[in-house]
Amino acid sequence: MKINDVAIYRVTWFDAQDSDGNWTDIKDIQNHELATCQDVGWMVHRDETRLVLMRSRIVEKDEELREGGGHIAIPNSWVIKVERLEPVIR
């Protein structure tokens, strides 16, 4: 796959959020919220179950995408928003 054929996205998603382990009033425990997270990267995969973002890549002279790193798989059911980012050419 060519890197120029893979778009960059910002994905906003919910994740579990643990407590700090201290004694906490039961009302505060009941109101404990999910964490709202964001990741930015090349979307290298998306299907009915999940999307996969990759944050880093090895630059090849032929622009072929062979290796990447810093990747995350996010279940679609956790996703709040997917925004395609357009590169700014200077």
Image (cartoon, helix red, strand yellow):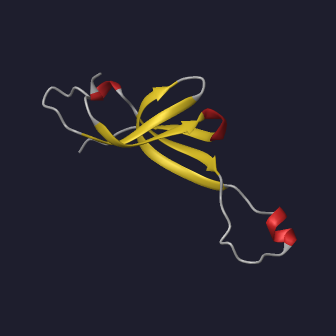
Q: Residue at x 27, y 24 (%)?
A: 2
Please identify the quarter of the rendering in which residue 7 is found.
top left
Q: Is residue 43 above or below residue 22?
A: above
Residue 69 screen position, x and y as percent: 33, 42
Q: Residue furthest bottom?
A: 23
Q: Position of residue 13 (x, y in %)?
A: 60, 45
The answer to whether 67 appears left or right of 70 in the picture is: left
User: Where 27 falls versus 59 (above or below)?
Assistant: below
Q: Residue at x 45, y 27 (%)?
A: 45
In the displayed structure image, the side of residue 73 where residue 6 appears, left or right: left
> Relative to residue 78, is residue 56 drawn left or right?
left
Q: Name above or below for residue 36 compared with residue 6.
A: below
Q: Quadrant of the C terminus?
A: top left
Q: Position of residue 33 (x, y in %)?
A: 73, 59
Which quadrant holds residue 31?
Answer: bottom right
Instruction: Please provide percent x and percent y for residue 39.
Output: 48, 47
Q: What residue is at 78 percent from the left and 75 percent from the top?
A: 24
Residue in view at x 65 percent, y 59 percent:
17
Q: How many numbered marks does the figure carry?
A: 0
Q: Please identify the quadrant where the N terminus is shown.
A: top left
Residue furthest to the left in view is 61
